[in-house]
Image (cartoon, rainbow, N blue to C red):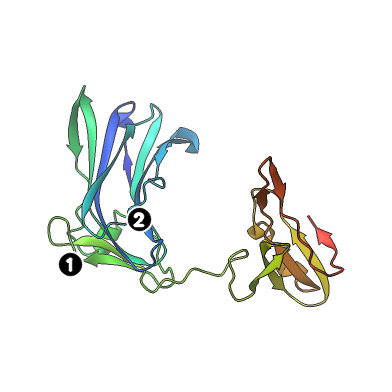
Amino acid sequence: MHALSVKEYAGKKFRIEAAVKVNLIDSTADAEVWVRVDRENKKMGFFYNMMDKPIRSNEWKVYSISGRIDKDAEYLVFGGLYHRKGIYYYDEFKLYIETEKGKFEEIALPYGGFESDSVTTAKSWGYLKNRQGVKINVTDKESYAGKQSFCVDASAFTPPKTYGNNDSTGRYANVNGIKIYYEEYGQGDPLLLLHGNSSSISLFEKQIPELAKQFHVIAVAVFLVYTGFNFLCAVFVLHSTAPCVI
């Protein structure tokens, strides 16, 4: 990501452009371009991250985000996002500011074309470092323009096991024709954990490690079932005498 002071452009329209290419390994992988305006007193202004328009194309294409810089803006922050296994390429980040009605002027960005080495680029473009299974650097293997692009190689990335998404302990129970997902931790007397509506097992991420020291914790993913008239909480029975924590 890159942060640019934009106090002198407060109230003006802007457009961010970037070329992106994605080599999918996981079919659900995707990339995005994002933009955020940081206002005074650490408040957030304009924000958009393309989550409703994920990028999955293996051909270079220029994507743009347009908006207006807030009147009390301090910085315009922008960059690229990526999710799951894939190899992601970003190139030719450009910023345009409306100087007159309908007329946009390009504002020079340091190393927006990533034609320098990785060390020099990192002085202007920040990114997550030491993420397991992810290699980040400037590459000459792909480019939209010039000879290089910014590459995020997440081909060896393995999602961390989290509460609610742990295939080493997660299981399914078929109860009254309903497939219920649950996870088990620890040993001892059974203890049933039920999260609230619009939540997940991850709600108990701080409680499970401590409870598992004394109990056989059974954390259940509760969801809603549409009956045709209204939504009802899924009914299940785990034939046990487990006390329940809601």
Q: CA distance from mark 1 to mark 2?
A: 20 Å
Q: Amino acid at mark 2?
A: Ala
Nearer mark to the viewer, of 1 and 2: 2
Q: Is residue 35 visible?
A: yes
- Tell me the SS state at disc 1: loop
- Tell me the SS state at disc 2: strand
Q: Earlier in the sequence, mark 1 or mark 2?
A: 2
Outermost residue toward the top in this view? 101
Q: Which residue is mark 1?
A: 140
Q: Amino acid at mark 1?
A: Asp
Left or right: where does residue 123 sit relative to residue 185?
A: left
Residue 201 location, quadrant:
bottom right
Q: Which residue is mark 2?
A: 31
Residue occupying the point 33% across, 28% down: 10
Left or right: where does residue 231 sit relative to residue 90?
A: right
What is the crowding at mark 2: few (fewer than 14 residues within 10 Å), some, or many (at least 20)? many
Count of numbered marks: 2
At which x and y percent is residue 191?
81, 67
At which x and y percent is residue 98?
23, 29
Q: Disc number at residue 40?
A: none
Residue occupying the point 22% across, 51% down: 61
